[in-house]
Structures are given as C-alpha cells and as structure tokens.
Image: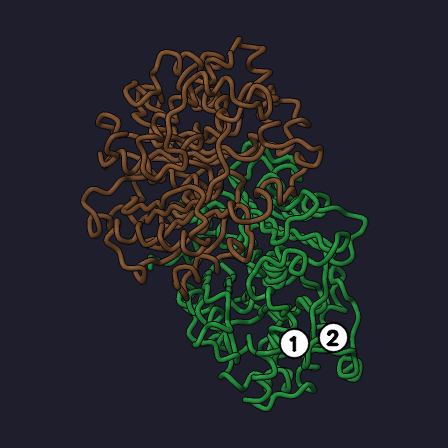
Chain colours: A green, B brown
Amino acid sequence: MGTTLKDQVAVIGVGCIKFGDNFDQGYEEMAAEAAYAAFHDARIAPEEIDAAWLGTYSPAQGHGKAAVSLGDALRLYNKPISRVENFCATGTDAFRHAVLAVASGMYDTALVLGVEKYKDRPGRGLAREGVHPYYHDGSTAPGLFALAATRYMHEFGLTRETLSKVAVKNHRNGALNAKAHLQKEVTPEAVLTAPIVAYPFGLYDCCPTTDGAAAAVVCRADLAKKYRADHILVKGVGLSVTSGRPFMDPNFDYLGFRATQNASAQAYAMAGITDPLKDIDVAEVHDCFTWTEISNYEDLGFIQKGEGARLIEEGRTALEGDIPVNPSGGLKSFGHPIGASGVRMVYEIVTQLRGEAGPRQVTDPKLGLVHNVGGPGAVSCVAVLGQP
Amino acid sequence: MGTTLKDQVAVIGVGCIKFGDNFDQGYEEMAAEAAYAAFHDARIAPEEIDAAWLGTYSPAQGHGKAAVSLGDALRLYNKPISRVENFCATGTDAFRHAVLAVASGMYDTALVLGVEKYKDRPGRGLAREGVHPYYHDGSTAPGLFALAATRYMHEFGLTRETLSKVAVKNHRNGALNAKAHLQKEVTPEAVLTAPIVAYPFGLYDCCPTTDGAAAAVVCRADLAKKYRADHILVKGVGLSVTSGRPFMDPNFDYLGFRATQNASAQAYAMAGITDPLKDIDVAEVHDCFTWTEISNYEDLGFIQKGEGARLIEEGRTALEGDIPVNPSGGLKSFGHPIGASGVRMVYEIVTQLRGEAGPRQVTDPKLGLVHNVGGPGAVSCVAVLGQP
C-alpha cells in the first residue's frame, strides 16, 4: 500500500434534499437540487468544478446510467464525469473516488453526487435488477441479513427487544430531522408487534424504500480556505470487498462483516485512529436492519464482537451518549436511496462537525465516521472526516 | 485543473483473451483468464495487487454488477475493488481510475479488468438494458451514428466507398491477429454489397457483438523496474462528458464528437503533445462504425475536420502508414465487448510499444494512443502511453 492521504483533501460544501416518496421530483430534479445546494454551501460556481463522480446503483427510466445522468441533470458539460457503482456502498465509494482524484493532483475540485429514484417505478432496485447470484435462490436483502442476525442471536443471546431499541433510537433521531423520510418516533411495542418481514426483522427493523439525493464538493486542502474557512478535512478512507456469495465463503461466520472490519482498519490507519470508541465523536453507520447497526458497532471496533448490544442498551449510541450513532436517523428513519446514502452520511457528518445539526446536534464533535456496507455484507466503504 | 500525472504511473503487465463467441467461457472464466495473463505478464503475484477496478457496462446473469464480480472471479478478497461504468468508454475510464489512484499515492499497484459477456444471453446489452433516453424513441446505436454519418457525408462529400476502406483496413489487420473475433479480410465489394443495417452502414460498417476480457496492471513508475525493465509509462489521460441527448444539444453539429476533442486535448496537454499526427506513432481508436473512425481522425487532431477521408484514402492509417490506426483490427474486426474494449486497446498499445505485436507490428513506435467514445458520442476517454 502507498502513503496516507490524511488532510490532503477538504470537504468544502454539502447538500441534501428531503428524502422520501418524492413523487413530485424526477431523478434529475433531485440531482440538481442536491448538487446546487452543495455548490451554494461551498461558495463555488459549477464551472469551477474540475471533475465529478455519480453514485447510482439502480439505473431506471433512462436515468442513473453513466456519467451523462449527472452532466445533463446539472447541464455540467465538457467535464470528466464517471459513474461508480458498488452495491449499497456506492455513495461512499463515489466520495472515495473524488478524494483519490483530488489527492492525485489531477483535479483541484470535484463534485460527488449520489442519487436514487425508487418510488415511481416498477419494483425496487434490488428486486427489479435481480442480477446478483445471491438473489437467484429467492433470498432477498432482509432474508439474507436475517440469516446472519439469527445466527448472531443464537451465538450471543441477542434479543428482539434489544434490536427494537436501535429502531427506537434512530426513529427518535429522525423525528428531529426535517429531511428524514420517516419523521416519527416509534415505541418498543410498535417495533415488537409489527408484521415480521424476515425473522427476527419486523417492519420497523428494516429501512424503507426511499427516493433521495445528496452531494458534496471536495477540493485540495491547501485551496479550501479560498472557499470556506470552516472546511472539513478527509482524515481517512477505506474500501474492502469480500465474496459476493457469503454462503460459499467458508470464512463467513454470519456474525459480522469482514469487509467492514477491513475498510475501517484502512481508514483508521490513515487517520491515525487507535481507539475508535474514544477517538470518534459521531458516526453514521449502515443500519439497513437493526441487527446491522449492532454488528457494525463491533466490526467498526467500537466494542468487542458479541458485546455490541451493550452500546445500545446503555444508551451510549444515543444523541446524548459518548459515541452517538446515526444522529441523522440512519437508513432506518432517514431512508436508504442506495447511491445517495453514503453521500448523505457525509452531509450529516460535515453538518455535525460544523455544529449546524440543530436539535440533533451532538456535543462538540471533532472526528466523525461514515460507513456503508453493501451486498450480502460483501463490500464496505468507510470515510473519516475531521476538524482541520 | 491540477498538475500533470505524466510519467508517474507505469503499465507493467497486460492480458487479453481470444475475443469472439465464447460459448465455452462464462463471465468469470474470461475475467480470470485475462487477469492472470496480466499478472503473469507483470511478473506480479495477485496478493501484491493493492486495489482493482472493474469495467463492465452490461451486468447480466449475476455477473458484472459491483466489485464482487471481480473479487469472486479471481478469489481476490479483502482488497479495495470498484466498478466503473461509462457507456462504451467504460474500459478506458476504469484504466484512468487506476492511474489516478496510484498517482494519488494511496496504492502502489492496481489491476484494471474489463469484461463483457453478450453472446449467451437474451438480447444485446444496449438493447436489453434500454435504460437511456436516446433509446426510448426507438433509435439504436447504428441508427444514431448513421444520422451523424449521413450529415457528415452531405457536408463533406464522404462516400460509402471511402467508408468501406476503413472496414477493409481493419479486417486486414484483424486477420493478422489470433485474438480477434473476426479473423478474416473483407473485399470492398463485400462491404458495399452487404445488407444495410442503417444507411450508410452495411453489415461490415458495424462492429460485431462479442464476448471478451482484457486486463492491465499498473504501478508507481518508481517501482516499475522491480517488475519489468520494459514497462510502459502513462503519459496522459483525459475524460470528457457532453450531453447524453445530442438531439437536444444545440451545439451538436452531427459532424464529430466534442467529447473526443476535449478528452484528447486533456491527454495531449498532460503528455506534452502539440502535433498529434507527428507525435503519435500508433493509435487504437473507437471504430464502432466505419464513419466513427474517420470522424475520430479529426476529433483526435490528426487532421482538419472534414478531411479525415484523406488519411484512409492515402493509406496513411494502414499498418505501413505514418499513423497506423487500429493495428489490432479495431472494434470492427477484434470485436467490441463494451467494458473490455478500452482495456484491450491498452493491451494492444502496450504490445506495440514493446515491439511484440508480431505480423501486425508497426515500425518502432514510441508513443501510442487509446481512445473510446461512448453513448451517443456523449462520453470520451483517452490515454496516451509511451516508452520511458
């Protein structure tokens, strides 16, 4: 591996639209609203953007396929634009590519745009596309993660009661967030009595299907002050890919995801983080299901494998806790438009680090973490952002 | 824009499988054969690869979607792997991403793999996916490029006889290439009397539908000697995106592609090329249709707009010419498995620069060009490779 990119790239602007059932917006309207919000936030003119990356997982209805979906949406022409796709880690990986490209010296500034349109089309992305082997046997995302969750419950004695507390926490945070899809609190009773989707996951243990778009503008750290004095620095990034067929992977123990362990180890090494629980002040992690968040606590090194339940039981990952997780509401409440989610997490962490998160602001964060896991736990991308 | 990456990244190994109707190979078999050929050529062990990029445009039958399609095919696990997609420029853009990432200092070595499986599945990729607006009105790739070709013929007096000479040249080159899909020469008469696909394009004016895979291994230039003394250096890369809806673009004159003009201008500036016709010794350009190659001559700056026909008429782009174009046989004869093509062009140019192209070897090349154009002329990616 090469040298560290720590502090070489800055995030100078972020933008995020209201996530939800956006029947009043098409793919391009969402993309343009998020990108222009980021341009405005960065005090940058579109023509000052040197290159751009689009993160869309499920192209449909003529949008999200190839870089032209970004170019035409923003009328941003004659620029280098690429589409990156990496399962549910698509958004974070698009951000990682912009960071690598700016760090290379090739571009001074770059736009990252994550967009996904799911609500007014036949079928959900994953079901509609159904192009990956692990869907060919009839399993689905809830069904697959449920296999890991049940194994984990058997191994470590995790209960549905504890899982429900993740949903309650993230819905509580989302209720404070005007841009979240599901802006409402839920009671433990409601979570535990909801219809079962795939045991142990009931309706409130699963993230919803959502439309959304988010954007970030990055630039060379040494040029950041030209745009914003209060820019945020990229401290580390990491990406790791394991097998896309966990059932065929003899090393898959169903208790967590090696991709997350590896990706976070890369990002921590770059950021100089030795004790994630102590060093990280706020985290947006991939809570596609309630169990995933608990498993992420462990795979991200916040706590030993098998002990993640303690962090939620003791309220340590609540807004007032010592390691607030998903202050935005998470995928669970904010929604999960796949390609948009990772960029939306960057938006949240930058907003928190700036102290601009309003009612969901955590106390004086200096270092924040962004985490996606994709496919059957096969892909994970992590970014660590911090104060200059 | 930032600084130049000239001479910072080296190509230390390339691999390419036999292109064609590969009914005896699946997506993963093709991917593994190409990648291991590149590993062997680079004298590198798979575990020495720091990161990888997969270029596949049309995922199908559970393959080509997301980075796991590369990881599982090669059993290359716990590495950062991403999928890049950019229409027919997918392969070259995957190569560009590996170059940017190595230049960033983040990785010392990277694998680029382009793979596409078209022949044993329902429909061709573009037709099957049909997800881009310019296909919604019933137009197809031949139909769309034919609109530009007929406008060009009207404007500059180009004839089908001249177009046929591009097919004759590229088939002649492909007949010398054991890895080409269509290893046969064609006569001008055969080209001119072939069934019309979309006027002015007959069957032999169009590239075929092909299965294929190609790979390249890049590394930091200062480490290249550790692997191969005869490595090739990346002199320049460029990518440009215009509108994906040329019919809606008032600036589109149907006579050439601004994306190619911009992408090559970026790559030439980085490589320090001021006179492409004189400086470039061999080129692999995107001849999806015969007219496209002639238009490319102009858009790549080899000759003035409207005069491209002279280069083919005077035999200057033949193997023996002063600017040999598509010595491999081009998309026309070698075939065009979309994500594989750009990487296959890198394979050809590296092979030519090493003087290892056998019967199709051009005379003593020092500088070579790789060019893809994608979508309705909307995307272009260019790379310039040269001797150290």
Question: Gap in Å between the C-alphas at discs 2 and 1?
Answer: 8 Å
Q: Is residue B365 left or right of residue B181?
A: left
Residue B288 can be seen, yes or no? yes
Which residue position is annotated with label 2? A204
From this view, report whether residue B204 is shown above or below residue A153.
above
| Residue A374 x, y percent position in the rendering | 56, 64
Query: What residue sits 59% from the left and 17% below the top?
Result: B150
For mark 1, name the chain: A
Q: Which residue is mark 1?
A: A290
Q: Residue sitting at 65 percent across and 51 percent down?
A: A115
Residue type indicated by callout 2: Tyr
Q: Position of residue A19 (x, y in %)?
A: 73, 57
Front in this rendered view, residue A29 or B162:
B162
Residues at marks 2 and 1 on the same chain: yes
Q: Are marks 2 and 1 in contact (CB under 8 Å)?
A: yes
Per the image, label 1 sits on a secondary structure element best described as helix
Count the labels in the image.
2
Residue B289 vertical position relative to residue A177 in the rendered view, above or below: above
Mark 1 residue type: Thr
Hey, which residue is sitting farthest left in the picture? B229
Q: In screen coordinates, is A218 left or right of A19?
A: left
Specify the quadrant of the image occupied by residue B73: bottom left
> Relative to A7, does residue B269 appear above or below in the rendering?
above
Residue nearest the observer in this picture, A257 or B215: B215
Residue closer to the observer: A110 or B237? B237
> How far across and how far down the image is residue A353, in percent?
59, 63
**Furthest-bottom residue in this view:** A157
